[in-house]
Amino acid sequence: MVQTGERIVSSASERYMLIYMIAVLVIITTLVIIFFIVFQKRKNKLLLEKIEQQRAFEKEMILVQTEAQEQTLKNIGWELHDNVGQLLSFASMQLSILKMQVADDVKDKFKDTTEALSNGLKEVRALSKTLNNDVILNIGFEKSITNELDRLRRMKFTSAELKTIGNKVDFKDRKHEIIVFRILQEFLSNSVKYSEAKNLNITLNYQPNQIIISANDDGKGFDTDTIEKGSGLINMKSRAELIGANLELKSQPNKGVLLQLFYPLS
């Protein structure tokens, strides 16, 4: 009877001990799981912060580079307008004076040279305006595009047109106008150098939440899968990312090139 009682007590103690050990094991396991979850969250947070810091650093570097490029372009614009423009004006004036001092049968020979100097002076002044961001902001985004297209049409293109859809909406930041204009300039420059195109078109599609800016030429195009990613394309994409825009470039051999820029308004 006593031994039976002792076994019952012993059995009860063993059960309590087993329950205690299970409880301790559950608590330890729970703590380990909680610690692991907290550790993973902390680790992920640190990784995200590191990625954000890297993105912020890259954005800052692109911004600094863009500002440096803008200052360089502005300086070149000043040089073209003030120095080269003055030299061409002086040459044109001297030619006019010389023309007055020669015989009538010789004056006709000055005609082509005079027109070439006059056109050269006009082109230099037009180019200097597109390089100076202060001028672009002063005359406006759309007028700057029109001026650039007019200049290119005089150079080599059959047509170079700007089309506007919807009611005009201002950019979130006027500095973004400069960046978008430089992206378009890069595209147009590539069309001049590589496309062998005859026609250029730019469309500004104003929508409530975004501006869709499209630029296309009818040149020889290229295979987007095999084309080398040069500095021009990299610059365009970097500038687009800087202002939170999405840039897409589409092309096929002998079917021209289409650039689309989606600029968010909110």
Image (spheres, rainbow, N blue to C red):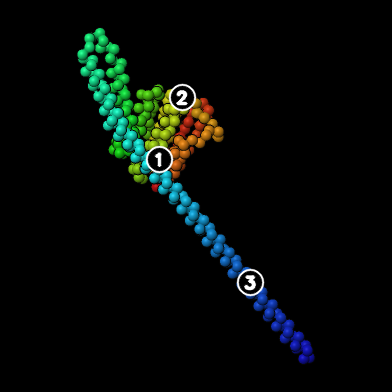
**Which of the two discs, 3 and 1, sits closer to the camera?**
3
The reply to whether residue 129 is visible in this rendering is: no
Q: Residue furthest bottom?
A: 2
Q: Position of residue 3 (x, y in %)?
A: 78, 89
Tag 3 residue: 26
238 to the left or right of 120 = right
Q: Nearer the viewer, residue 81 or 148?
A: 81
- Measured in 3D between alpha carbons, the distance from the residue under mark 3 to the one under mark 2, in whole angstroms, is 75 Å
Q: Position of residue 44 (x, y in %)?
A: 53, 58
Q: Residue furthest top?
A: 105
Tag 2 residue: 196
Q: Vertical placement of 14 versus 86: above or below?
A: below
Q: Position of residue 41 (x, y in %)?
A: 53, 61
190 to the left or right of 43 = left
- Measured in 3D between alpha carbons, the distance from the residue under mark 2 to the one under mark 1, in whole angstroms, is 28 Å
Q: Earlier in the sequence, mark 3 or mark 1?
A: 3
Q: Position of residue 232 (x, y in %)?
A: 45, 35
Tag 1 residue: 211
Which secondary structure lies at badge 2? loop
Q: Vertical placement of 229 versus 123: above or below?
A: below
